[in-house]
Amino acid sequence: MISLTEARTLIWERISTLPPHSLMLEEAYGHVLREDVYALEDIPAFDRSAMDGYALIAEDDSQRLRVKGEIQPGAVPSFKIERGECARIFTGAPLPEGAMQVLKQEDAYVQEGYVTRSKESSIAHIRYRGEDARQGDLLLSAGTHLEQGELALLAGLGITMPMVSPLIRIAHFVTGNEIVAPSQTLLPGQIRDSNSTLVAAFARQHQGKIVRQERVSDDLEMLQNRVRSCEGEYDLLLISGGASVGDYDFGKRVLIALGFDIHFEKVNLRPGKPLIFATRGQQTAFVLPGNPVSHFVTMQVEVRMAMERLAGAEASWPEFKAKLAAPFTHGASTRESFWPARITAEGGEIHVRALRWKSSGDGTGMAGANALLHLHEAASAPAAGELVLVLLIGSL
């Protein structure tokens, strides 16, 4: 049994990043950028007005200024401003030659083609060429997740086909004679399949694409044949259940038969101790413990890292301290523990509440979770008001 740190190190070292491809900008949201992006020209590319007003010579102290012309955004000024002159100008329009100050229209009195100042100001009200970035400046680094701001920047740079990581293709098999579809009426001994929905939602959150998802009974040959039937279709193989050492836990045997190299089988983790990680060339596989909370935790602390590595992203671990809002029952454990929790902002502080969880099979403890309380080995239950470590897994 290895530590979580050792497990994450092995995951990072053993997985190969998927090759990038170009993608239309409007389809690139959430993808990982796989190239450094530099400014192709100065930003802004020219001196422009930051206000609606009147462009004039900065040191001009004339009492009245003749309005020589008008400059709208997108227009190229065809005249030069001399002392005693100004030009009507609008926000974003280029400055005419000679002008290096803009008098705000609120500070100007206009009458019969002449402007007088109603208020003196030394502020230029100009966005200067290159003040945001100079040509050749690095603006986005490879490994950046493309969200609203990044996509807008790429559009402004004229990059319409960025190089990004592809969606990670995921094949998922849920094992167990007792597992039935969520829509099915339960017979004695049966359990509805919640892990398929959990995995599908996780994949969507982390730029994965489910290419195969099936329920398979506890039959070694059947599971092996079903996994073999989608050879070459997936980058990441997930098998729910079959990670332990019981008579009907077939995950490891299936992976070995398919030519995968097993890198670890147990992690000093609660929940999620039985967890198999394997690779075969460019393909990655995990056999996850079948209980839903174990699924929930192992996907966040281990499988997510595998997806980041496949996508060429940096390994994320958004962990910080928050104040525990209320006490909860936690038995001391020799394993590193992660407890489903809810983070909220209250009174200017970040608070966290442990969610109800009786066992790793208790799916009610996942509803509302946007974080995991991180409790180290042999830690006793923290008291209310104490600062505790939390791993953010959703939005605040």
Image: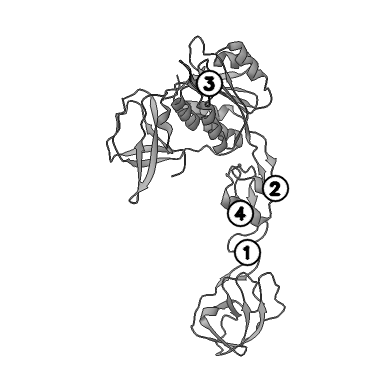
Q: Amino acid at mark 2?
A: Met
The residue at the far right in this view is: 78
**Left or right of 357, for residue 288:** right
As helix, strand or loop, the secondary structure at mark 2 comes to loop
1 or 2: tag closer to the N-terminus? 1
Which colouring convention does the figure follow? one colour
Give the foreground label among 1 and 2.
2
Q: Earlier in the sequence, mark 4 or mark 2?
A: 4
**N-terminal of the two: label 1 or label 4?**
1
Percent across and percent down for residue 29 are 61, 45
Going from the N terminus, do you reach mark 3 or mark 4 first? 4
| Mark 1 to mark 2 CA distance (whole Å) | 22 Å
Where residue 98 sits in the image (x, y, percent)? 64, 79
* Amino acid type indicated by mark 3: Val
Q: Earlier in the sequence, mark 1 or mark 3?
A: 1
| Residue 373, placed above or below residue 229 | below
**Label 2 sits on residue:** 161
Identify residue type, mark 1: Pro
Residue at image mark 3? 180
From the top left corner, tell me how far across and down residue 107 is, in percent.
51, 81
Q: Horizontally, is 268 left or right of 55 in the view?
A: left
Marks 1 & 2, CB-CB < 8 Å contact: no
* Mark 1 in CB contact with mark 4 (< 8 angstroms): no
Q: Quadrant of the N terminus?
A: top left
| Residue 289 appears in the figure | no
For the residues labelled 3 and 4, the Cα–Cα distance comes to 45 Å
**Residue 152 badge:** 4
Q: Which residue is mark 1?
A: 44
